[in-house]
Image (cartoon, grey):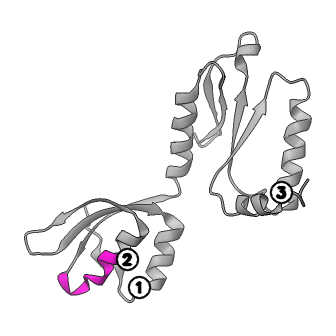
């Protein structure tokens, strides 16, 4: 199986979050979970954060749509019925919450003589809002993955941290 899906599985290694969808109404759900985790370990993707999606609660007595959290309050499981649309809003909320911990948001004031940075941010498609400050600086709000911000800091020839608006 791994050989057949090698390209797809390699992309898994680059993910920030894995959604592990499990048919919890299946008597063998635990074995299925273990098999997937073994494959993730074989491809060195077992350290990537997982959100367990416990599907088919409509087939289980007394189970309702909900989010289970770990001791730090982060979502670890979402109980839902995809067919009936129960808990889909909870899944979207949990995904957003899990991914947002890997995101940074900054407001920046960039002087006109550093206008080349504007193209960099546009190319990254990370600008949430933009305008101009009274002094003519370009004012932007950016939102991006932490790893992209870290790469950008190393790539550009300016101290980006010095452009961050301190609140």
The residue wearing badge 3 is 5
Magenta region, mostly helix, strand or loop? helix
Magenta residues (range): 112-119
Mark 2 to mark 3 CA distance (whole Å):
35 Å
Sequence-wise first label, 1 or 3? 3
Q: Is residue 55 left or right of residue 147?
A: right
Labelled pair 2, 3 in contact (Cβ < 8 Å): no
Q: Position of residue 14 (x, y in %)?
A: 67, 63
Labelled pair 2, 1 in contact (Cβ < 8 Å): yes
Q: Position of residue 77 (x, y in %)?
A: 67, 35
Sequence-wise first label, 2 or 1? 2
The residue wearing badge 2 is 120
Mark 2 to mark 1 CA distance (whole Å):
9 Å
Q: Position of residue 61 (x, y in %)?
A: 75, 10
User: Crowding at label 3, few (<14), some or many (≥20) Cα neighbours within 10 Å?
Assistant: few
Query: Which residue occupies the extreme bottom position in the image?
Result: 157
């Amino acid at each position: 199986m791994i050989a057949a899906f090698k390209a797809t599985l390699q992309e898994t290694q680059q993910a920030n979050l894995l959604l592990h969808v499990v048919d919890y109404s299946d008597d063998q759900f635990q074995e299925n979970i273990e098999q997937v985790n073994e494959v993730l370990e074989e491809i060195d993707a077992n350290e990537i954060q997982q959100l367990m999606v416990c599907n088919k609660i409509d087939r289980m007595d007394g189970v309702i749509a909900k989010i289970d959290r770990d001791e730090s309050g982060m979502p670890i499981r979402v109980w839902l019925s995809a067919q009936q649309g129960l808990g889909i809003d909870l899944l979207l909320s949990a995904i957003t919450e899990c991914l947002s911990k890997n995101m940074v948001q900054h407001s920046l004031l960039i002087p006109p003589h550093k206008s080349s940075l504007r193209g960099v941010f546009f190319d990254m498609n990370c600008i949430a809002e933009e305008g101009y400050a009274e002094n003519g600086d370009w004012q932007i709000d950016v939102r991006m993955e932490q790893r992209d911000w870290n790469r950008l800091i190393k790539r550009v020839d300016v101290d980006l941290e010095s452009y961050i608006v301190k609140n």
